[in-house]
Amino acid sequence: MKFIIAAASLLLACPTATAFVPATSAPNAYVRQTTLAAEAASGPPYSGPSSKPILDSINTPADMDKLGLRDLKQLSNELRWEVIEAVSKTGGHLSSSLGVVELTVALHYVFDMPIDQIIWDVSHQCYPHKMLTGRRERFSTLRQLGGLSGFCKRSESNYDSFGAGHSSTSISAAQGMSIAKSMLNKRTNNCIAVIGDGAITGGMAYEAMNSAGYLKNRMIVVLNDNGQVSLPTGTPSAGGTVPASQLSAYTSNLLVSKPFQDFRDFAKSFNRLLPNNVQDVNKRFDEYARGIISGGTLFEELGFYYVGPIDGHDLDNMVPIMEKLRDSESNKPVLLHIKTNKGFGYPPAEAASDKMHGVGKFDVATGVQQKKVVSSPSFTSVFANSLIDAATEDRSIVGITAAMPGGTGMDIFGRRFPKRTFDVGIAEQHAVTMAAGMATEGLRPFVAIYSTFMQRAYDQVIHDVAVQNLPVRLIMDRAGLVGNDGPTHHGCYDLAYMGAIPNLTIMAPSDEIELRNMMMTCAAYDDGPTVLRYPRGSGYGAEK
């Protein structure tokens, strides 16, 4: 085992877009989108309602039972602006939460938490959920010591069905809950996994769907399709600037080839969840209702009943469809495909290239964020620019990221060398083994993955890289404590788990100069795999 470590960084880190319009859209969707466009066109200053009477009356989801659809729409508007105003004061994950406001309202209105289980994949979109489940008054403490977590956390509330922070776990958790409810003869069995088109690129999601379809477990998977696979989506890479997922391309084709499904269309095809003898009677009518080409082919082949696509901002159709699925006696798993817009309802977020995914404090009226003035470059940018320098001299150098080009600096490298940049989606295991394959043929791959996410590829580091002593360069950003994102994102385990693996040369720079030198060492070292770990944040202004 070889270690090259500078002590200073062992553990502590440094401190107007329009809504989606389908080929053929329901009239109410058109009116909603037209209204939004008109609001966006008016420009800043932006502001929400002066009072929030319906939201003020909601302490738990049970308080929503008395509301009608018109009230739910007003609640959604009040809730959206409550999220905007709260996050503007603390920072956090903004646009993902704004995109699921109507979905969150519909889920809590239709289902009975905490008896029913709603599992949010990654759960960075959980702010509306937390506000509806008794935690609204604590949002001033969001992502602070002793305050609200930025993710779902079982110890925080019995409405947080399953903790998260990493992706692609929700379907597996929902399946486990469904099996347990069935085996324990619990009165109701409604388990809903909400997963985005980014998180569903992770292999674990497919493993779970394969298992659920085979075992025929009663569950609902809500695929929240917003076209934002990577952070940010649109970074130049070998795949172009489209989302880094063929599944995203597939679901996008469904959205443009089919109109949004409304409740009447859904009701016509609902017999697919009925007993087989009823299905046979209604088969020809069902085929007519769904059309000659079934939009859910991939998911149906995995054993799911596919519903969609549905406008994820249209409560008039989401609520009755969810009620029908809730009341079905079928044990067949369901995939409900909804289309949403990340940052929906807040023009600065909709227009931003990153959709204002993760923000600091900002001015609600303009969307302008408060940026700290830093005099030295970030460790991430030092790595990226050093990699560009090395790649300029060596055409065998390539960069790999798992849906995090912005956070790892691969967006910088990608702008200079798009054909040598590979974004594989949220697929850390695949990224590491693909790099091992590249190394066998003479390429020099740099795999840039956050320290906390490299945990997901541990077996691949051992089995596919270290045991074969292949010269793969493992670049671990966010090493050490990362602050606001909390325990699911701390990179404080990598020295322990990497240090136990043979054949690795592990490097940890104490400043920018050492980072640059160690990066060049990685590029030149072909006698085995290397690991380069460095913290989040800006450097120390060390002179070259």
Image (cartoon, rainbow, N blue to C red):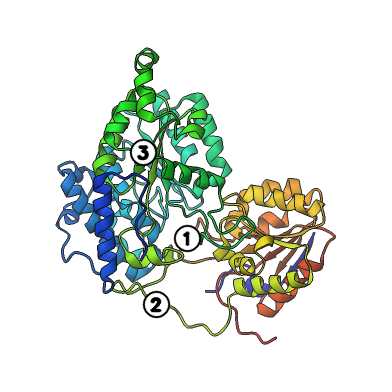
- Give me the residue at 37% from left, 12% from top: 277
- Give me the residue at 20% from left, 55% from top: 55
Query: Which mark is on residue 370?
Result: 2
Q: Nearer the viewer, residue 213 or 64?
A: 213
- Give me the residue at 79% from left, 48% from top: 467
**Which mark is first along the chain, 1 or 2?**
2
Q: Nearer the viewer, residue 327 or 293?
A: 293
Q: Amino acid at mark 3?
A: Gln
**Which mark is first along the chain, 3 or 1?**
3
**Which mark is first along the chain, 3 or 2?**
3
**Disc 1 target residue:** 486
User: Closer to us: mark 1 or mark 3?
Assistant: 3
Tell me which corner region of the image, top left, top right, bottom left or bottom right, holds residue 237: bottom right
Q: Amino acid at mark 1?
A: Gly
**Disc 3 target residue:** 117
Q: Amino acid at mark 2?
A: Gln
